[in-house]
Amino acid sequence: MAARSLEIGPAGIRTARTIEILRTERAQRELAARVTAIGRPMSDTMLSRIERAQRRCDIDDLVALAQALRVSPLVLLQGPSAM
């Protein structure tokens, strides 16, 4: 099986930046714990890698992060200008 590309596109970069901006009021550990409590296991390392666009944020991550941040997933996809 061929390895999946880790290249992150513009929407992924924008989403990563928006997650980081919204999270700045909380520690990564706190947000990761909230996402895990929602039912999507996530460590603070995983969250950090998503924020730095070193890990893909799949749709399940996106929905759980939006719920934990109390925003619409659309806000994460549209970027900081949508806030």
Image (cartoon, rainbow, N blue to C red):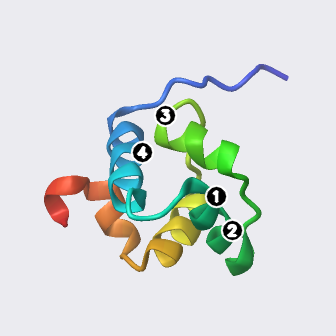
Q: Are marks 1 and 2 in contact (CB under 8 Å)?
A: yes
Say left or right for 45 vs 31: right
Mark 4 packing: few (<14 Cα in 10 Å), some, or many (20+)?
A: many
Q: CA distance from mark 4 to mark 3?
A: 6 Å
Three-letter amino acid code at disc 4? Answer: Ala
Q: Any mark on residue 53, and which? A: 3
Q: CA distance from mark 1 to mark 4?
A: 16 Å
Asked which quadrant contains residue 70, the reply is bottom left
In front: label 4 or label 2 = 2
Mark 3 packing: few (<14 Cα in 10 Å), some, or many (20+)?
A: many
Question: Label 2's element?
Answer: helix
Mark 1 packing: few (<14 Cα in 10 Å), some, or many (20+)?
A: some
Give me the residue at 57% from left, 65% from top: 31
First of labels 4, 2 by sequence position: 4
Residue 62 x/y as whole percent:
52, 61
Q: How many marks?
A: 4
Q: CA distance from mark 4 to mark 2?
A: 18 Å
Indicate the quadrant containing the C terminus: top left, top right, bottom left or bottom right.
Answer: bottom left
Three-letter amino acid code at disc 1? Answer: Arg
Looking at the image, residue 64 lies above or below residue 1 = below
Q: Residue furthest top?
A: 2
Which residue was labeled with disc 4? 16
Give me the residue at 51% from left, 23% from top: 7
Which residue was labeled with disc 2? 33
Asked which quadrant contains residue 40, the reply is bottom right
Three-letter amino acid code at disc 3? Answer: Ala
First of labels 2, 3 by sequence position: 2
Which residue was labeled with disc 1? 29
